[in-house]
Amino acid sequence: MTNYVGSEVGRLATVLLHRPGRELARLTPRNNDSLLFDGIPWVGRAQEEHDTFAAALRARGVEVLYVSQLLAETLSVPEARAEITASVVDDPRLGDTLRRRVADHLTYLDPSALAGVLIGGLAHDELRTSVDRPGGLVYSLMASNDFVIDPLPNLLFTRDSSVWVRDRAAVTSLAMPARRRETTLTGAIYRFHPRFVGTQFVYDASLEPVEGGDVLLLAEGVIAIGVGERTTPAGAERLARRVFEAGLAHTILVVPITQERATMHLDTIVTMVDADAVIMYPKYADTLQAYTVIAGPDGEPQIDGPAPFLRAAADAMDIGMLRVIDTGLDPVTAEREQWDDGNNTLAIAPRLCVAYERNVETNAQLERAGIEVIRIPGSELGSGRGGPRCMSCPMLRNGVGVA
């Protein structure tokens, strides 16, 4: 099946998710900050919430793919297994002796077990050593609960490690060290899994930082890229160049956002819920700016602006105006529900979206504006600062006009 995503609101047909597992159980008060979580989630409840999310998508005819299953199948390909394993053990923290011991340990794992380690991590006490297979000085100086291979709790947010721009995959370059192995796994899946044979790429993890939460496909040929805590100006420029070279868009809006935890990605501020409507944090509706970038005659990006984001977006999309639906009703509610990912909705189709049930006022606002809201629980899933859009990587969307 051909993958194609041309907008944020075309009828969703296939999506990539990651059901949280052992990697979430690895979070402790000692490591949750370095692993980018604001709290310690209740894993069983997080899995229940995620299963509800997946079921809601399937009930609307969406094919749900899971990272863990695709990764295990990819690891059955010898070339993929060798490449991923080499990447994991190429860690300067390990030292030569421990590196050899880890590589030896991974050799004996079947594809499913290896996928589990690559996602869930490998702790010091889980790596068996002996006189014949020593761990070396590094292993000896580790605490028993230290990780030889770090877990990937943020893999839950599949939006960030890859984005489909029309029929091309952009394997992104994640800014935070705790997340960089995610793109190693995603990139290998797209390159080696039989389902994705022949995939063409418009970006890869070796390039400047770009994260999928900062990339919004506003319409066919129009892309917004947030620049802030995660995506850098150089990353936005590199992605723009590559998109223009491939003929995937005619206009890119580069949108500076505040470098704060509450606004780490553009999709924490604004997401689309209809072909001409966005849900948006009121604090930014009148202040968010955008630079309009097009390809010049010589191929060099031409930059205009800044201008108000809503105006620049409407002009690029060739519509009169973008309808804005506010998060919350009053400043305090708006701030609370923005923190709880009230803006981070996933459109299944025009005027149909998935949102966290806890954002009561925002969901009511959406419904008053004619948007059907599928409410899902998210008390535990939200502890990593991400909503339904963050937790999903669309791989196939039908046209906006297709019901």
Image (cartoon, rainbow, N blue to C red):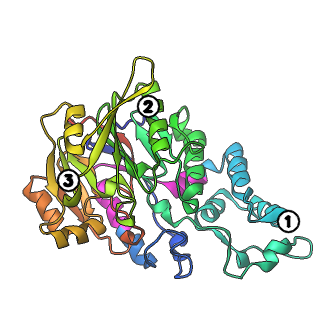
Q: Nearer the viewer, mark 3 or mark 2?
A: 3
Q: Quadrant of residue 133?
A: bottom right
The furthest residue to the right: 132
Per the image, label 2 sits on a secondary structure element best described as: helix
Residue under numbered circle 2? 243
Give the amino acid at mark 2. Val
Give the amino acid at mark 3. Ala
Per the image, label 1 sits on a secondary structure element best described as: helix
Locate the C terminus by quadrant: top left
Residue under numbered circle 1? 97
Q: Is residue 388 above or below residue 122?
A: above
357 and 292: which is toward the camera: 292
Per the image, label 3 sits on a secondary structure element best described as: helix
Residues drawn in magenta = 50-72
- The crowd level at tag 3 (other Cα within 10 Å; few <14, some 14-19, many 20+) is some
Locate the N terminus by quadrant: top left
Give the amino acid at mark 1. Thr
225 and 80: which is toward the camera: 225
Q: Is residue 358 visible?
A: no
Q: Earlier in the sequence, mark 3 or mark 1?
A: 1
Q: Earlier in the sequence, mark 3 or mark 2?
A: 2
Residue under numbered circle 3? 285
